Image (cartoon, helix red, strand yellow):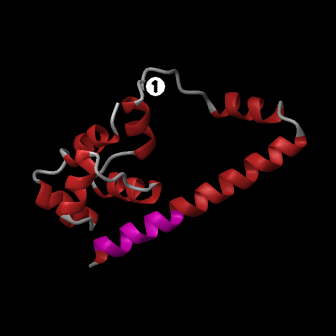
Amino acid sequence: MKIGNLIKDIVSRASSMNQAAKKSGVSQSTLSEWISGKVSPGLEKYIYLCRALGCRPGVELDNFLGLGGAKPQTAEDLLGSVLALKPSEQQRLIALVTMKFSDYLEVQEMIDIKKAE
């Protein structure tokens, strides 16, 4: 599995490479390098690309890795799993979720700014 194939699938949601570049703010040459596998996007750029082209980064990645058929857990299932963790692991999880949520908000803000332009 190559990350370029995943990027190619995401970029194909736009009508053209040019449109994908305009919507995402990533140059056509950079998109081509990602698709060819010469360069891999960082997580932030991957998330930004997905959001700009109207797809969900986690879902796209799960499908790419073959995890798309897994049964989603309910909030109650997840809470039960969290409560079963040791207190120190719960604290690490809270810190990780807080950090990821902060990253998400920053990416969402960049998308909103780009849309306003």
> Pointer 1: residues within 10 angstroms few (<14), some, or many (20+)?
few
Q: Is residue 27 toward the left or the right of residue 68 in the image?
A: left
Span highlighted in magenta in the image? 105-115
Quarter of the C terminus within the rendering: bottom left
On the image, numbered disc 1 is attached to which residue? Answer: 67
For the residue labelled by badge 1, is the local secondary structure a helix, a strand or a loop?
loop
Query: Relative to residue 91, is residue 30 depicted above or below?
Result: below
Residue 9 x/y as whole percent: 24, 40
Q: Which of the two residues, 110 or 11, is positioned nearer the viewer here?
A: 11
Q: Main secondary structure of the magenta part?
A: helix
Residue under the point 81% across and 43% down: 90
Residue 86 x/y as whole percent: 88, 37
Residue 20 x/y as whole percent: 19, 57
Q: Amino acid at mark 1?
A: Leu
Task: Indicate whether residue 113 is drawn in magenta.
Answer: yes
Quarter of the N terminus within the rendering: top left
Residue under the point 69% across and 52% down: 96
Residue under the point 41% across and 46% down: 57
Q: Which of the two residues, 44 or 110, is positioned nearer the viewer here?
A: 44
Q: Which of the two residues, 93 or 30, is positioned nearer the viewer here?
A: 30
Q: Residue furthest front?
A: 38
Query: Relative to residue 77, is residue 7 depicted above or below?
Result: below
Residue under the point 11% across and 51% down: 15
Residue 73 x/y as whole percent: 59, 27
Task: Indicate whether residue 60 is drawn in magenta.
Answer: no
Q: Which of the two residues, 47 or 114, is positioned nearer the viewer here?
A: 47
Query: Relative to residue 47, is residue 77 depicted above or below?
Result: above
